[in-house]
C-alpha cells in the first residue's frame, strides 16, 4: 500500500538522481545528503506544481 507523506525535500552536496521511476514511485539519489524531510503542506490542491510533483501525481 502506497502512502502519501507530502513533498520530500532532500538537501546536500553533489546530489545526483540515478533512478526515477514513475511506475513504482522510486527515486535513487546519490551524494552527500545532509537532511531529508517531508512538508506538511497539501500539494494535491496546487494547480501548477513542480515537475517532480506532476510525475508522482
Image (tube, helix red, strand yellow):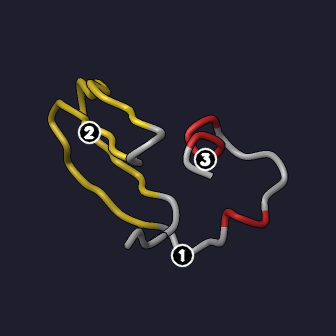
Task: Give the side of residue 48 with respect to residue 17, left or right.
Answer: right
Q: Above or below — where is 3 with respect to 24?
A: below
Tag 3 near tag 2, CB within 8 Å: no
Image quadrant in which you'd find residue 30: top left
Distance from Cα at disc 1 to Cα at disc 2: 21 Å
Q: What residue did someone put label 2 on?
A: 12
Q: Is residue 55 left or right of residue 44?
A: left
Query: Marks 3 and 2: which is nearer the front?
Result: 3
Closer to the camera in the image, 45 or 33: 45
Q: Secondary structure at mark 2?
A: strand
Q: Which mark is residue 40?
A: 1
Which residue: 29% across, 57% down? 36
Residue 7: x percent and y percent? 51, 59
Q: Which residue is pictured at 17% across the width and 30% down the height?
A: 31
Determine the CA span between mark 3 and mark 2. 20 Å
Residue 53's disc is 3
Q: Secondary structure at mark 3?
A: helix
Front residue (pair 9, 46)? 46
Comes first in the chain, label 1 or label 2: 2
Q: Which mark lies nearer to you, 1 or 3?
A: 3
Amino acid at each position: 500500500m502506497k502512502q502519501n507523506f507530502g513533498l520530500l525535500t532532500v538537501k546536500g552536496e553533489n546530489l545526483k538522481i540515478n533512478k526515477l521511476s514513475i511506475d513504482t514511485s522510486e527515486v535513487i539519489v546519490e551524494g552527500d545528503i545532509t537532511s531529508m524531510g517531508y512538508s506538511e503542506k497539501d500539494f494535491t490542491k496546487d494547480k501548477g506544481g513542480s515537475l517532480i510533483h506532476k510525475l508522482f501525481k
